[in-house]
Amino acid sequence: MTAIAYLGTGLLGSGFVEAACGRGDSVTVWNRTIDKARALAPFGAIVADAPADAVRGARRVHLVLKDDAVVEQVVAQLRPGLSPDAIIIDHTTTQPALTAERATRLNAEGVHYLHCPVFIGPAAARQSQGIILAAGPTALYDAAKDALGRMAARVEYFGERPDLAAAYKLMGNAFIIGLGGVLSDVFSIAQGSQVTPTDALALLDFFNPGAILAGRGKQMAAGNFAASFELEMARKDVRLMLETAGALPLAVLPSLAARMDAVIAEGHGQEDFGVIARDVIRAASGGGQP
């Protein structure tokens, strides 16, 4: 029976704890709101009153916390009880630069720290589904990868650069949140056309925007803006979308229209609408800031 600790037992942390208890691990839990930790006692979790108590004797310490500031606070509080050979596995979504600094500092101080954010919801955590990202020292990843593999359907290791998992997590969440914003705008366009949200989703039965995304993304990343959908024509369509939505709330399209207008004013209206990414693509290819 492996002794592990979970610090942070909100929705996601609780899902991980339930799964770990189901696998037969000896799990100690702590949460700032103690009732959330106590709710896991029926599953077999041991409830600790303080972070240092929670990690005492644990081989792995899993953090599922709010942000960088909370991670720093909790790590400082747990260190008096941390075993020298224990690995801290941090699942928190954090800022890449701060993650890199923290990982470098803690590992230099002899604290084994591996950043492993996730694309997993609470229900998937209970079923050991979803994706875990990992970045940090290879030796730590090798020591933890079997345990990570029992927590998720897939584990992606990005190597020793400590901020890469954090960066890819934010990029992934940008897709999730951005697509949610676009979907909200689609519903507004639908409402402006007297189409229900449910009926609007019928579009996905025969139209797959994800299939378009991969091909267009490769062209944009390569800086290929040869027109297949001219920016000026795309901007016209956005105007029609805004007009159709009318006074209904829009999350994404107004900002997109403003970016299109700026790039058209720079003389790129006849290029593919992917040219709206030209400045960041140029910077990434060594062209410097616009």
Image (cartoon, grey):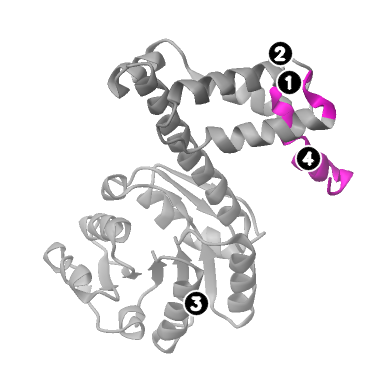
The residue where tag 3 is placed is 72
Q: Which residues are magenta?
A: 267-290
- SS at mark 3 in the image: helix
Amino acid beneath label 3: Glu
Relative depth, front residue between 261 and 222? 261
Relative depth, front residue between 99 and 149? 99
Amino acid beneath label 1: Asp
Chain-order first, disc 1 or disc 4: 1
Which is more foreground, mark 4 or mark 3? 4
Q: Give the image location of residue 195, x and y in percent.
A: 32, 16
Q: Are marks 1 and 2 in contact (CB under 8 Å)?
A: yes
Q: Give the image location of residue 223, x and y in percent.
A: 79, 30
In the figure, residue 70 lies in which quadrant? bottom left
- SS at mark 4 in the image: helix
In the figure, residue 190 lies in which quadrant? top left
Observer able to see residue 222:
no
Mark number displayed over residue 279: 4
- SS at mark 1 in the image: loop
Between the residue at mark 1 and the residue at mark 4, the CA separation in whole angstroms equals: 14 Å
The residue where tag 1 is placed is 272
The residue where tag 2 is placed is 228
Between the residue at mark 4 and the residue at mark 2, the CA separation in whole angstroms equals: 20 Å
- SS at mark 2 in the image: loop
Q: Is residue 135 above or below residue 201?
A: below
Q: Give the image location of residue 65, x and y in percent.
A: 40, 66
In the figure, residue 52 lies in which quadrant? bottom left
Q: Give the image location of residue 96, x and y in percent.
A: 61, 60
Taking the image as shown, residue 231 lies to the left or right of residue 175, namely right
